[in-house]
Amino acid sequence: MKKYSIHKLYIVGLLALSAGCTDLVTDEVDSIVTPVGNEGFVKIKDVPEALASAYKDLSTYSDQAGIYALGEHVTGEMIPPTRGTDWGDNGVWRTLDTHTWNASHSYVLSAWNALNQRAYRANEIIASDPNPQQKAQAQFLRAFNMFQVMDYWGVVPFREVTQGVNDLPSVMKRSEAFDFIVKDLEEALPNLPKTGPSVTNGTASKAAANWLLAKLYLNKAVYKSTTPEGPYTFDKADMDKVVAYVDAITADGYSLEKDYFNAFSSAAKTEPILVVMEGTAQNRWFMTLHYDQNPSGWNGFTTLAEFYDTFEAKDTRIGAPAKKNGSQYSGIGLGFLLGQQYNDKGEQIIDTRTKRPLAFTKDVPLVGAATDKGIRVIKYHPANSGKYILMRYAEAYLMKAEALLRGGNAAAALTQINTLRTTRGASTLASLNAENLFAEIGRELYWEGNKRTIEIRFGKFLTGPGVTKSDAYTVLYPIPTSALVSNPNLVQNPGY
């Protein structure tokens, strides 16, 4: 693959935006960029190559740390227990679980750097005379990464490619960033391809832009609020837009997978909107499986009994037992792994450390956990895993249901939810309110990396299992200390 040969002034400018980044390639290998003007900007010659690289960069979302950790570990459906010296890591996981992070937290910094770098690279593509389709792709990528920055930190730094190295990036407030991101997506939509569901949907499409627009308007009350912690007022006009955007996705041929776990496999047919084509979803099983299972995992993250107990026994989303038929990885079940675990031949696994049968338990402490403590979670099965999903139809479907409820059409929202529950084998609900809708969203989307945003929207982020610091300011992450030093236009979020 070609590498970027990047002008020295560009590197300095980017570091001013994202202090601490280390993955820039600076060797003069290919001549795919050309200096323009007097401000250090380099115009990309090979726009298709740059776009391909930008899509590969989406693999950062599939890591178990950084962006994913900030969106999931801080919620009531995941816990990162320390097992002896395993997973201690100087407290980076525990402080996420307890909401006691600070501005020097390594994952707060790594996520900030990764997202802002990727947004800037999209700026470069947009400024390099792309054709309309290429520009639309870059606008989508810029919007996707800026959305996450806005959601996590409440501000978005922005550097124009024509700025000199001594010019500091400007800083958009949350409300301004919302408008900028929406504008990017609306401008991109007409020039994005219409693409139906596919496990190879690795680039932006109309459905992907509509998905992100729906999410933006569903959370608009949060992003436009003068008090980040709420309460929030949801405007019916915004909810109507959510419904319209989701209906446009449905019109492109998307629907719910009849088999829940099929959505995360290589055989998925109706749900994948946007996936990460680079690499696999292997981090999602490595981060939870025990080291004596096949494949051997890192014996890390588990769910909590309080969350597990929200499922009905007949709800197919709770999982399926391991096949144990002797084939590779058949000792691993689907969904929630609880109780005695078996190898591929159906034999009991013996924990090599404790010398006892390996049986996962409901109870799990945050500190001092034994190797068998905690319910493990498998949505991507190592035997047939599809690519890591960034956007799937079921989340859009739930966004529509929530918008209908918040927009005053509870009957239509109930019908939407009961259709989903029937598809998943669960009993129908007699009525729908914010409380049982929140629970239903959790049952459908667990461990997919977006729970923090949902909890904040429903006013549940500051409470729940494991939260020892429930101060309102924690709904936003602190701006990393190094970013404040490199850009005085940034002001630390209140409380930090």
Image (cartoon, helix red, strand yellow):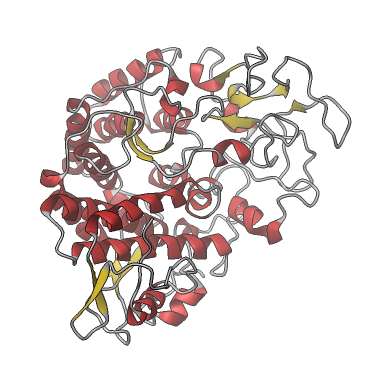
Q: Quadrant of residue 234?
A: top left
Q: Is residue 392 above or below residue 177?
A: above
Is residue 297 shown left or right of residue 66? right
Residue with the most extreme right position = 355
Is residue 172 shown left or right of residue 457? left
Give whichever of 193, 478 is nearer the camera: 193
Q: Is residue 473 above or below residue 11?
A: above
Question: Can I make out residue 462 in this image?
Answer: yes
Question: Can I make out residue 239 in this image?
Answer: no
Is residue 283 shown left or right of residue 80? left
Q: Is residue 253 above or below residue 402?
A: above
Q: Is residue 487 above or below residue 248?
A: below
Please identify the quadrant where the N terminus is shown. bottom left
Give whichever of 34, 495 is nearer the camera: 34
Q: Position of residue 160 (x, y in %)?
A: 24, 73
Q: Quadrant of residue 343?
A: top right
Is residue 60 shown left or right of residue 351? left
Give whichever of 49, 176 is nearer the camera: 49
Who's the residue at 19% across and 29% down the image? 247
Who's the residue at 23% across and 58% down the image? 47
Q: Position of residue 122 (x, y in %)?
A: 27, 61
Who's the residue at 38% across and 24% down the image? 268
Q: Position of residue 265 (x, y in %)?
A: 45, 26
The tally of labels here is 0
Q: Position of residue 424 (x, y in %)?
A: 43, 16
Who's the residue at 50% across and 16% down the image? 315
Q: Quadrant of residue 152?
A: bottom left
Give whichever of 459, 178 is nearer the camera: 178
